Image (cartoon, rainbow, N blue to C red):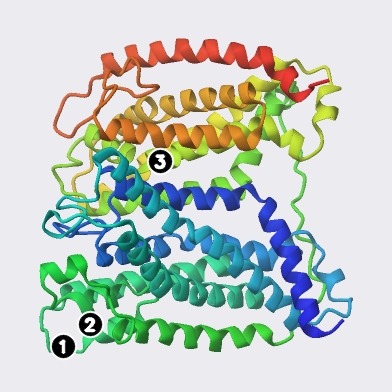
Amino acid sequence: MIWWQSAAAVCRFELSVQRREPATVLYGLVFLLLTFAFVSSGTVELVADRGALPKLSPLAIALALGGLTAFGQVITTMITASALLRDRAWRTDQLLFTTPLSHSAWVVGRWLAALLTMGAVYSTLMVGVLAGAAALYFTQGSLSGDQLATNGSALSALDVIRRTVWAWTTITVPTTIAAATILVTVAVRTRHLLGVLSAALVLLFLWQGCEAIVRNTTDSASVWPVLASLADPFGTSALQVVTSSWSDAERAARLVPFVGLVGASRLTWLVLALGIGAMALRPMPYVVGRNESPAVGRVRGGGVRWFAAQPFFALTHFTLRWTWRERGWLIIATLGVLNVASHAFTAAPNIVADAAGVVALVREHARLFLILLATIYAGEILWRDVDERVVELINSTPIRSAQLVLSRLLGVMTAQLTLVMALAGVAWAARLLVGGAPSAPQVLAYGVLWLFVPFALWLMMSLTVHVLVGNKIIGHLLLIAGWVLAVAIDANGWAQSPWIRFADLAPLGAGQAAPVVLALQQAAWWCTVSALLLAFTVHRWRRVTSPR
């Protein structure tokens, strides 16, 4: 087999693995929902200090896609790391390089597969913008208004498509290729996930530094903004420098030219990335190292041993450990924590002056991530046994359906409780660093009520939908469509009563007394509804998992 055929075979194999990964679909859903919510409603803001700049202006779309490309470095990291480190994780790397496959063909094949996977994932950015514009068109009758077009003039569908494709082609595509190539090289040379994560963090810190230089430089004749634009790995600094002298009308309607500083910054990083990528093609000695398999520890203590031996708690512990270690969960949780931390650092002091304000901020900026986790991992509770082909083995055990369902639910809920504590703790710590943090116990208590309880209810409702539908893909699609419909209903002011808005507790606000009693009453009501749904889920469980 010649070289290019070997690389193509490796690429096809890696694509087949990535295609079966549920996390790949999850990544795309994150981008799609973020851009959809940004365009169709005011619940998500992706462009800092946007002011009167229309959402569907070429500059706003380019800045939003560039910011999400930077924000998605965690996703880029995991896709590249999984592609290049999978053989090491499966302990087949030593066997692989005893075959005639060359090192360069292996690297190029994996690199191409990672790029194609990221191309599919990042293309959902365009889909989200276009879907959000379509939603606005159907609700308003036209794409007009100060937040959509200049001077209230309406946009055509062709205008929106042209602006979106231009921003994606000139910003997202070259940035993704450059970042992925650098991370692939780090993965090949270090063979450790920590090295890839460190490289991604360096890119993010460099981006933040370049953005700060551009924002804080007031001298129009200074060369520093230009140098910062060239050093910016994600291209948003160049967009701001090029458009800084434009009028409001130009910023709202004119396409940002690629020829010039924007193109120079992208080409600079592409050339740099390809130069770094050449290092990945150098052969490496694949010697057998020490055994890195996790050691099996002994359970000490009679009480702990008894606890672990009980089937219910053993299943709960297994589900909890699997959830914590699952790549998709880690990615979404990390994105949520980073998003909350960034907003907590930059929030005005009056917005987070008390515990209610801190939890309200976490609720606003982590809600989407919690909903995604509830939607995806409710399906995993039901369908993971089917995907792993052990469902018949599980059904042959004496474990009752109620025991199986409740233990798995408890495991996922425990994992989410730790995430809620992390979100609330990060927001509190961010306010502590900038001065004036509220009471930590109060923040955690409010976090449990306003963040964890709704998640638990969403999880049970999502599981009921999967059991009722009996199909994993259709269940995910119905739930995602339901959440999108809920955003549209909320944006139009419909169905405002919290007694019919599922798991939507009384709102929190900074400087206001927290409606604890009302929230507890609403939580009790929705817990009762969810208990009925859970009873139905348990009743139908065997019919779905054992259709015979």
Q: Position of residue 99 (x, y in %)?
A: 89, 76
Q: Which residue is mark 3?
A: 368
Q: Amino acid at mark 2?
A: Pro
Mark 3 residue crowding within 10 angstroms, few (<14) / some (14–19) / many (20+): some
Specify the label residue 74 is tagged with: none
**Image point (45%, 14%), residue name:** 527
List the residue tagged with mark 1.
222
In the image: residue 87, left or right of residue 415 = right
Callout 1 touching callout 3 (CB < 8 Å)? no
Crowd class of label 1 (few under 14; some 14 to 19; many from 20; radius 10 Å):
few
Query: Is residue 270 depicted above or below 482 in this figure?
Result: below
Q: Is residue 181 above or below residue 372?
A: below
As measured in the structure, the alpha-carbon distance from the residue carrying label 1 to the one carrying label 3 is: 41 Å
Q: Residue drawn 70% across and 19% down?
A: 541
- Secondary structure state at the residue bearing disc 3: helix
Q: Quadrant of residue 102?
A: bottom right
Separation of disc 2 and disc 3 at Cα? 35 Å
Quick check: 496 above or below 231? above
Q: Position of residue 331 (x, y in %)?
A: 52, 51
Give the total of numbered labels. 3
| x and y, in percent, of residue 266 in the image | 40, 81
Instruction: Return the x and y of residue 135 as percentages of the image width and height.
Output: 34, 43
Residue 327 as seen in the image, left or right of residue 164: right
Q: Name the N-terminal-most of marks 1 and 3.
A: 1
Quarter of the figure with the C terminus: top right
- Give yes or no for contact between labels 1 and 2 (Cβ–Cβ under 8 Å): yes
Identify residue for label 2: 225
Can residue 428 be seen here? The reply is no
